[in-house]
Amino acid sequence: MARGRKQGGGRKEPRFGLAAAMADLRLDPKDRIPSDDTPKKSVAKTAKKRPVEPDDEDDVPAREPKASTPKPKPRRGKSRWGMSIGRMFYWALVCGLWGVIALVGVVIWAGAHLPPIQSLEIPKRPPTIEIVGYDGTMLAQRGEMAGANVALKDLPPYLPKAFIAIEDRRFYQHFGIDPIGIARAVVANILHRGVSQGGSTLTQQLAKNLFLTQERTLARKLQEAELALWLERKYSKREILELYLNRVYFGSGAYGVEAAAQRYFGKSARQVTIGEAAMLAGLVKSPSRLAPNRNPEGAAKRAQTVLAAMAEAKFITEARAQAQIAHPSVAVKPAGAGTINYVADWIGEVLDDLVGQVEESIVVETTIDPKLQSVAEAAIIDELAAKSVKFNVSQGALVAMTPDGAVRAMVGGRNYADSQFNRAVTAKRQPGSAFKPFVYLTAIEQGLTPDTVRQDAPLDLKGWKPENYTREYFGPVTLTQALAMSLNTVAVRVGLEVGPKNVVRTAHRLGIASKLDPNPSIALGTSEVSMIELVGAYAPFSNGGLTVSPHVVTRIRTLDGKLLYMRQTEQPVQVIEPRNAAMMNQMMQETLISGTAKKAEIPGWIAAGKTGTSQDFRDAWFIGYTAHLVTGVWLGNDDNSPTKKATGGGLPVEVWTRFMRSAHQGVPVAALPNAQGSGLVPTLAQIASQITAPSAPAPSARSAPPSRGNARPEAAAGLDGWLVDRLFGGKR
C-alpha cells in the first residue's frame, strides 16, 4: 500500500456522472475566443502568464493568431494604383460602349422621323405675291419674297466668296459636316463662356432651310447632319452653293440673293458691289436683327466683319477691304413702303375669292397710284405729328377713289409697323353728319328741293333733344343752308318727314353695306359704317348717279404672263336720277363755300362734300369730291375715346385739302355732272351766280336767315320748276 502511494502520488478515487466525463477535458489557450475589445497580443500574454486550472471551466483562453509576414509598403501602394488604373480603364470602356450605343440609337431615331431619303426632293419655292401699281411700279410683296433663281456663273465671283469666308471657309474640303469647324466652334464657345461661333456648314444650313424647321433641338441637329450628308452625296459643291444662295433667308421676307438685292439695294444680285455682297453675307447670322432697312448701323458693322474675313481668306486684298469699309453700303427705301401694306393686306383678303388658293407666284395689278399713295401717307402722318397731342387724336385713315370706284390711294393707319389694323376697310365708326347727304337725297327724291325751307329750332322727341353744334338756332332755313351749316335739328326733322326706313334704303342703294338702324337718330349718323363703303356711297354724286363698286385689283397673272383674272367692266346702274344728283352737288358745294368746310379749296376746281363729327367728338370726318376724285378722311382714336373737340371741319379738311391739291396738279379741269341731255357744262351754282337776282344768303353764325315760309314745292315741279324759279325770279 505504501509502495503504491509512492509510485502513484496518492490514491485516486473513481468518479461517476458528469464530473467523471469531464474530468479529462482541458481547454487549450488557443481554443479561447478573444473578446472584441481585447487586443490579440494582450490575450496571448495573459494566456502565458496565467496557468489554466483543470477546474476553471469559465475561463477560456484566447487563440493565438497565426504569424504572417507583412508585405513591404512600397509594393502594396503600387498594386493599389495599378488596380485603380485598371478599374478606370474598364469603366471608361463600358461607358464609352454604352455612349456609342446610345448615340447610334438617337441617330437611328432621328433618321426614322425623316421622310425616306429616296423620296426627298428639293421643294418648290413658296408662292410670292407681287403687288404693282397701275403704272407697273412695284408696291409690295406678300408671301415669302423670292427672286428669280440666279445661276452661280452669273453672279460676281466675290458674292459667293463672301458667304464662304464668313460662314464656311472649309466648304470645298469637308463632306457636309466639318469636324474641324465643330471643334473650333466648341473651343471658341468655351473660351467665351457662351455661344460665339457655330459649327454648321453651308450644306447643313441648306438642309435646314429646305427640309427642317428652325427649332433648336438635338434631334433637329441630328436630322440636319444626316440631310447634309445626303445632299453632299447627291449634288456637287457648285450645285449646293447655288441652291444655298437662292434659298437662304435675308430678312424682311426676302429669300435668295436676288430678292435680297432687290429689297435692300434696288438692283439685281448680278450688279451688287463688294460692300453690298458683304452686307448680304452678313445678314445670314441674324436676318431680322441685321436687316439694313431696319438696323443700318448693325448691318454695316457686320459687313465690316465679312470684309475682314474675305481679306483673311485671300479672296480680296486688304486694301480693297479697307476701301469698302470706309464707304459702307446703304440700303434704299423701297417705293411705297409703309402704309401701302394696308393695301397689300386688303388685296390678300380678296385673292381667294378672285383666283382661289395661290399655288404659284403671281403678279397682282392694281389701281393704286404710287405718287398719290405717298402723298396720302405724308398728309396723314404729318398732320398727326403736328396736332395729335393738341387734339388728342392718335389715328387717321384716308381713301381716295375715282368716280367709278377705282381706289387710287389708301392709308389704313398712322404706322403699319405699330398696328396692322386697317381703319379704312375693317373699322366701323359713327359717320356723324357725314351721313346727312343720304337724308337730304331721300328728301329730294320725295319732291323737296335745295330751296325747300324747314325750321331750325329746338326739338324734343320723347326726351331726346338733338342740338346743333353751336347750340344756336336760325329759324327758317333752306335745305341747302341746313346741310352746309350741318344743322342737326333740320336733319332730324327732314329724316322723320321722309321716314327713317327710306333713309336707310337710300344709303344701302348707294353702297352702304353695314346694318343701319331706322330710328330718328339715323339722320345724325349714329349707325356705324366703314370708310371704304362711305366713300364709295359718295361716288355716285360725282359721276351723275351711277352705282359704284370700290375695287383695287384689275388683273392677276403668273410670272410667265398667264392671265388668271381680269376685272370685267361692270354695267353701271343708275341709283340716283341725274337731276337729283345735280341738286345734291349744288347743295354740297355750298358746304365748301360758306359751310363747315370753308377751308377745303382746290384752285380751279369745283368740289363738294360734307363734314362729320360724331358724339362727344369721337370721330372727325370729311368726305369731299370733284369730277376727278372722291376722297374721305377720318381721324380719331382706336379705343373710341373722345378727342379734344376735333371736328370734321378742322383736321380732316386740312388733310383732304393737302392731298387733293397735289392729286389735281396737271389734271384737266372738269365740272361736276349735271342733268343728262341738258347741255349744261357749268354747275347750277355757277348759273345762279350769273343771275341778277341774288340767291338767298347763307346764314352766319350770328344772324338767322330770312324766313322763306314752310310751303313745300310740288313733287311734279322737280328740278325743272326749281330751275325756272331760280333763273327768272319766281316764287321759291
Image: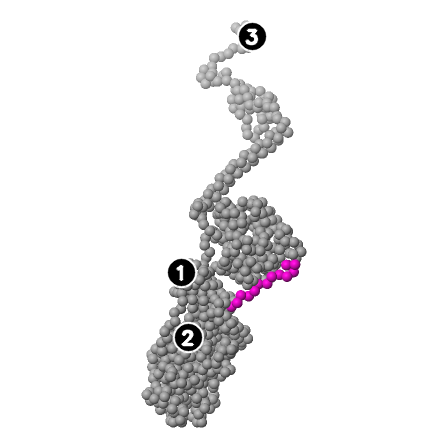
Of badges 3 and 2, the one in the foreground is: 2
Which of the pair 275/16 is nearer the observer? 275
Q: At 60% from the left edge and 57% from the top edge, which residue is drawn?
A: 274
Q: Secondary structure at mark 3?
A: helix
N-terminal of the two: label 1 or label 3? 3
Magenta-tinted stretch: 323-336
Q: Position of residue 412 (x, y in %)?
A: 47, 70
N-terminal of the two: label 3 or label 2? 3
Report the residue that reaches farthest toward the right: 319
Which of the pair 332/204 is nearer the observer? 332
Do tag 1 and tag 3 residues touch (Cβ < 8 Å)? no
Q: Disc 2 and disc 1: Cα gap in Å?
A: 29 Å
Which amino acid is tagged 1?
Answer: Gln
- Coloring scheme used: one colour
Mark 1, other Cα within 10 Å: few <14 / some 14–19 / many ≥20 = few
Side of 183 relative to 319 (left or right): left
Question: Is 334 within the magenta?
Answer: yes
Which numbered tag is attached to residue 357? 1
Q: Secondary structure at mark 2?
A: loop
Q: Secondary structure at mark 1?
A: loop
Which numbered tag is attached to residue 6? 3
Q: Is residue 124 above or below residue 472?
A: above
| Residue annotated with mark 2 | 404
Q: Is residue 726 above or below residue 622?
A: below
Q: Disc 3 and disc 2: Cα gap in Å?
A: 162 Å
Evaluate whether residue 384 shows in this view: no
Q: Position of residue 401 (x, y in %)?
A: 45, 74
